[in-house]
């Protein structure tokens, strides 16, 4: 059985018809969701690059290489070994220069009181610069309410994780269903999911683990192709090592952008 077979949609709301990004804006009250859809349409890019690099210099070099071709940059700000607050200022300036959104892949997973401090405080002050962040729902809906209390003041948005792209994940079945239900109760703040398939209408779907060839990395990460991700209902593909480890990062980003956008256009034509 191939990865494609394993990842065929299993929910009753399985993906059936592609709607143009621009035509979906009215489905969202959250301004960040509208901004992302507008950016995707304007740049003809449904590509997010996962900047899983460990130095500020590497991060900035990656942005200059791929900025023209992405709608969003996904960061892990806490893996930068030489982090300094000045890099946040540069991130914000470059996101405006190259016209993309910032997504901090924090994966909050604690009680409400703790995640409030993690979101707005510490050394990273995530809410001050990240348009989007994400959270696990293990703690229950209180985590969403806590992040919302901080994030809505800044016009931010949240993604939830009903699924993960790693082998053996426990994020499936009833856990996934409960996560979707929590999102539906907080639609003004929760704009979508990190997911391997389309799972609910009126939400955006972001798919990690995308490379040009199917396979795995030996540590549980399972890869699917850009075409497969889009065919399964993804709105934004997330590509990391396939781009930031490429000899030509700019060329790799341009290639992924084209393949994913072409797959989207093909669905519209159907």
Image (cartoon, rainbow, N blue to C red):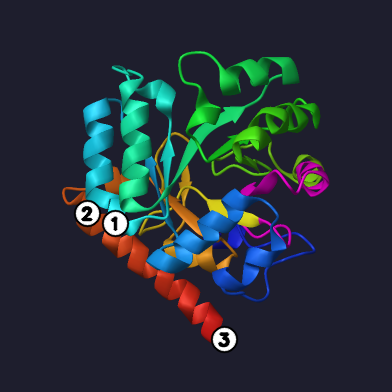
> How many angstroms separate mark 1 from mark 3 (CA)?
28 Å
Q: Is residue 180 left or right of residue 193?
A: right
Front residue of 3 and 172: 172
Q: Is residue 187 above or below residue 153?
A: below
Front residue of 40 and 161: 40
Q: Is residue 166 above or below residue 117?
A: below
First reached walking from the N terminus: tag 1 or tag 3: 1
The residue under the point 80% across, 49% down is 184
Give neighbour class at mark 1: few <14, some 14-19, many 20+ (Cα, 10 Å).
some
> How many angstroms separate mark 2 from mark 3 (CA)?
31 Å
Mark 2 touches mark 3? (CB < 8 Å): no
First reached walking from the N terminus: tag 2 or tag 3: 2
Which quadrant, please, contains the C terminus? bottom right
Front residue of 116 and 208: 116
Question: Disc 2 designates what residue?
Answer: 250
Question: Disc 3 designates what residue?
Answer: 270
The magenta stretch is 179-203
Q: Position of residue 193 (x, y in %)?
A: 64, 48
Say whether residue 182 is magenta: yes
Look at the numbered disc 3 and give the secondary structure of its residue.
loop
The residue under the point 44% across, 34% down is 219
Q: Position of residue 216 (x, y in %)?
A: 43, 45
Image quadrant of residue 175?
A: top right
Q: Return the mark for residue 68.
A: 1
Look at the numbered disc 1 and give the secondary structure of its residue.
helix
Query: Can residue 206 be seen in the rendering of this structure?
Result: yes
The residue under the point 67% across, 32% down is 136
């Amino acid at each position: 059985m191939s990865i494609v077979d394993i990842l065929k949609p299993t929910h009753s709301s399985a993906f059936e018809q592609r709607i143009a990004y621009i035509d979906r804006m009215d489905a969202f009250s959250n301004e960040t969701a509208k901004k992302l859809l507008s950016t995707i349409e304007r740049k003809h890019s449904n590509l997010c690059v996962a900047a899983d690099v460990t130095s500020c210099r590497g991060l900035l070099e990656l942005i200059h290489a791929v900025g023209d071709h992405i709608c969003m940059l996904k960061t892990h700000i806490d893996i930068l070994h030489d982090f300094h607050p000045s890099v946040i200022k540069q991130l914000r300036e470059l996101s405006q220069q190259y016209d993309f959104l910032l997504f901090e892949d924090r994966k909050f997973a604690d009680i409400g009181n703790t995640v409030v401090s993690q979101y707005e405080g510490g050394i990273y002050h995530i809410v001050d610069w990240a348009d989007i962040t994400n959270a696990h729902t293990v703690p229950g809906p209180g985590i969403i309410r806590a992040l919302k209390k901080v994030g809505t003041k800044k016009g931010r948005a949240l993604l939830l994780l009903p699924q993960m792209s790693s082998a053996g994940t426990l994020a499936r079945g009833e856990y996934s269903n409960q996560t979707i239900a929590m999102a539906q109760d907080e639609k003004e703040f929760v704009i979508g999911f990190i997911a391997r398939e389309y799972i609910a209408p009126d939400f955006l779907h972001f798919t990690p683990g995308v490379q040009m060839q199917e396979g795995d990395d030996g540590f549980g990460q399972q890869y699917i192709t850009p075409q497969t991700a889009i065919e399964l209902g993804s709105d934004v593909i997330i590509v990391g090592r396939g781009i930031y480890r490429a000899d030509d990062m700019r060329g790799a980003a341009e290639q992924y952008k084209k393949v994913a956008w072409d797959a989207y256009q093909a669905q519209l034509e159907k």
